[in-house]
Image (tube, rainbow, N blue to C red):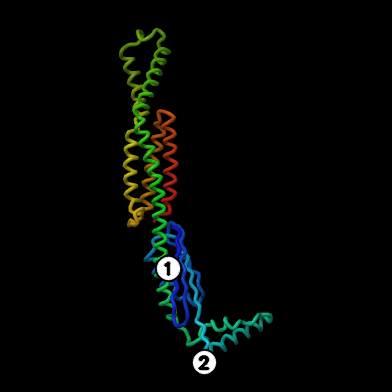
Amino acid sequence: MTAFGAARADTEQGSLSLELRGVNSRFLDLHFRMPDELRHIEAPLRDLLTRSIARGKIEVRAGIQRRVRNDPDALNMAALEQAAALFRKVQAVVPDAAPPRLSELLAWPGVQGTEESEDTWRDAAMTAAREALAQLHAAREREGERLAGMILDRALQVEDIVKQVDVRMPQLVADYRDKLARKLRDSVETAFPAGFQAITGAELSERLAHEATLFGLRIDVAEELSRLHSHLAELRQLVGGKAGGKADKGSAGKRLDFLFQEMNREANTLGSKAGGLEVTRAAMDLKLLIEQMREQAQNIE
């Protein structure tokens, strides 16, 4: 799911800002963008995110802004001389190198106070990360609710189509039976020009049984419609919690994907058994709606 979280933590040395940017992915993929002086906090941040997020491509951005003090006595002259020496070495190789600005010198590590240890920014980073993570989860929950609403809306359309086919089936069966009767009469007249008197009872029974079997296999979609109703009930159970703001535990996305595969299978069977254009169109509409739901479900964790 697409989500964002940002937070800042203040310390005596300055402030640390941290951002989490997440997009959908099948697996958990963490990318860190931070200055070298913060690389030591990557491991605890990775551990925190791994324990809190199951999947997604997460980009972690962190930066620090040191506090600028106006007290000249607070300057660390050793650190300032180190910065100056480094600039002189750079200028010896690149004579046209511009000297650092005052703000850049004051932001140099250690210039504004005592030397910083690896623990200086660790607590600030973890505090900011927890707040940003809470925002990220809240954003993913909101998107999950929107996706669930879209899926349930498509599910209602699927249910309407299934109900329409269910209601129309008696008439469709009657129409197909009349069509079958005409076909059987034409077939008999073609095979036996002399009429029914030329057909033995056994031959007529065999032909009728054969046509009836084909008719039953062709037109009986009650089982497919019943299974679609059952799948829709299961879909509401899986997605209904998210639409109501309660995140289901476990991999709902995988379960939904399997459910949509089964629904698509029933729609295909319905289309193959279609006794008329009306059912064929209904099967095509079902497949389109199921595919739309499946695409949305790919973003649900």
Q: Residue at x 38, y 53 (%)?
A: 253
Q: Quadrant of the C terminus?
A: bottom left
Q: Picture quarter containing residue 207?
A: top left
Q: Which residue is mark 2?
A: 73
Q: Which residue type does callout 1 highlight? A: Ala
Mark 2 falls on what kind of element? helix
Q: How many marks?
A: 2
Which residue bears the numbered disc 1?
A: 132
Asked whether, in this view, residue 238 is left or right of residue 24, the answer is left
Q: Residues within 10 Å of mark 2 (few under 14, many from 20)?
A: few
Task: Locate residue 166: give its quadrant.
Answer: top left
Depth check: 82 or 164 in front? 164
Q: Secondary structure at mark 1?
A: helix
- Residue 129 is situated, as x and y percent measured from the top left of the image, at 42, 70
Examine the rendered structure and indicate whether residue 277 appears above or below residue 153. above
Residue 103 location in percent, x, y? Answer: 57, 81
Q: Residue at x 43, y 33 (%)?
A: 280
Under mark 2, the amino acid is: Asp
Q: Taking 250 as reference, is 200 above or below it?
A: above
Marks 1 and 2 sit apart, C-alpha to C-alpha, by 37 Å
